[in-house]
Amino acid sequence: MSHRKLVLWLTLVVLSFAIGVHAEDRANCSNATLHGSYGFRATGELFAAVARFTFDGKGGFTATFFGRTPGNPFGPVQFTGTYSVSQDCIVTDSWGPPLNSTHVSVIVDGGKGYFILNSTPSSADGDTVNSGEARRQ
């Protein structure tokens, strides 16, 4: 292979990778990205939980939640909530009564899972950091 053809071939290969990587950077999520049932687990300071969330793909969900704090296991707690997914796969949600909390999440693996962080405002004295993840069942 001539030097000129080799350089041209290598240039095309590099450009192909660059275009592919750039396309991967452009997420294309919506509320429909979260649909179906997800197994969920979360932990925090003196807190652990597992749950099953079922997303409708339109901005609503139902959940069955089990938790534990020192000396106080609780659940099942059933509640509904709402969520909104941005095009870049960031989720904001609101859990209804009796938990009444808000969260921010990042969808991963094309909607097969998400990482979640509690974002409910609290006082410094009563604050704990709770985070978790979920996977599609």
Image (spheres, rainbow, N blue to C red):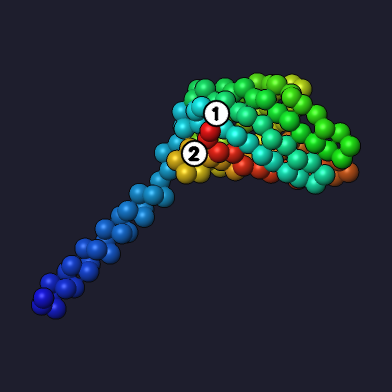
Q: Position of residue 135 (x, y in %)?
A: 55, 38
Residue designated by label 1: 37
Give the image location of residue 69, x and y in percent.
83, 38
Percent x, y of residue 37: 55, 28
What's the residue type where badge 1 is placed? Ser
> Of the numbered discs in the image, which one, if any, rests on residue 112?
2
Near mark 2 (Cα within 10 A), the count class, few <14, some 14-19 or many ≥20, is some
In the displayed image of the protein, which residue is found farthest to the left?
A: 2
| Res. 59 in view | no
Q: Residue at x 62, y 22 (%)?
A: 62
Displayed quadrant of residue 133: top right
Location of residue 121 with respect to 63 vertically, above or below: below
The quarter of the picture where residue 129 lies is: top right
Q: In whole angstroms, how far apart are the C-alphas of marks 2 and 1?
A: 10 Å
Q: Residue furthest bottom?
A: 3
Amino acid carrying label 2: it is Lys
80 on left or right of 1? right
- Asked if marks 2 and 1 touch (Cβ < 8 Å), the reply is no
Disc number placed over residue 110 in the picture, else none = none
52 relative to 34 in the view: left or right: right
Q: Residue at x 80, y 36 (%)?
A: 68
Residue found 89% across the figure and 37% down from its top: 71
Q: Position of residue 14 (x, y in %)?
A: 28, 64
